[in-house]
Amino acid sequence: MRVRITKTLTGSIDGIRLSRLAKGQVYDVYTSLACYLLSEQMAEPAPEHEPTASSPIENQKPKPADASKRIPFPRAMTRGDR
């Protein structure tokens, strides 16, 4: 989804550093991130014909999940019980 950043951002969400998104620039971002930015009034929808900045999100490698933070499924929901 294409959005224009309207505020200077800090912090991160889902492993994406928001500070890499520059105020006034247009980016193609994941729909979930776009919805968050729009709902918090940090971005506005941008038209499809506007050029985008190179996406810092695509250049950022996702971090592997920390095994200690995994939530175990109840026994009835494990693969062996299907």
Image (tube, rainbow, N blue to C red):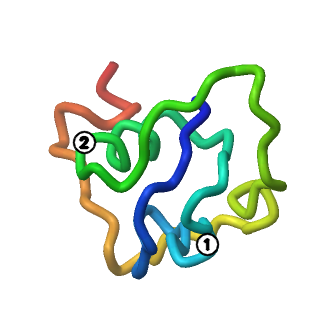
Amino acid type, mark 1: Lys
Expressed as whole percent of the image width and height from the top left, the position of residue 34 reads 45, 40
Q: Nearer the viewer, residue 12 or 82?
A: 12
Question: How many residues crowd around disc 2 within 10 Å: few (fewer than 14), some, or many (20 or more)?
Answer: few
Q: Is residue 54 toward the left or the right of residue 63 in the image?
A: right
Secondary structure state at the residue bearing disc 1: loop
In the displayed structure, would residue 59 be above or below residue 47? below
Residue named by callout 2: 39
Judge whether 53 appears above or below 67 on screen.
above
Residue 44 in the image, given as x and y percentages of width and height: 43, 39
At 40% from the left edge and 80% from the top edge, which residue is drawn?
A: 11
At 25% across and 57% down in the image, what residue appears?
72
| Left or right of residue 37: residue 52 | right
Q: Earlier in the sequence, mark 1 or mark 2?
A: 2
Residue nearer the viewer, 21 or 73: 21
Residue on which the image places disc 1: 63
Instruction: Classify mark 1: residues with Cα within 10 Å, few (<14), some (14-19) or many (20+).
Output: few
Quadrant in the rendering for residue 28: top right
Image quadrant in which the N terminus is located: top right
Q: Amino acid at mark 2?
A: Ser
Q: Secondary structure at mark 2?
A: helix
Where does residue 46 sit, x and y in percent of width and height?
A: 57, 31
**Image quadrant assignment for residue 8:** bottom left
Indicate which label's residue lies in the foreground, 1 or 2.
2
Q: What residue sits 65% from the left and 55% below the top?
A: 25
Q: The C terminus appears in which quarter of the rendering?
A: top left
Q: Is residue 35 left or right of residue 14?
A: left
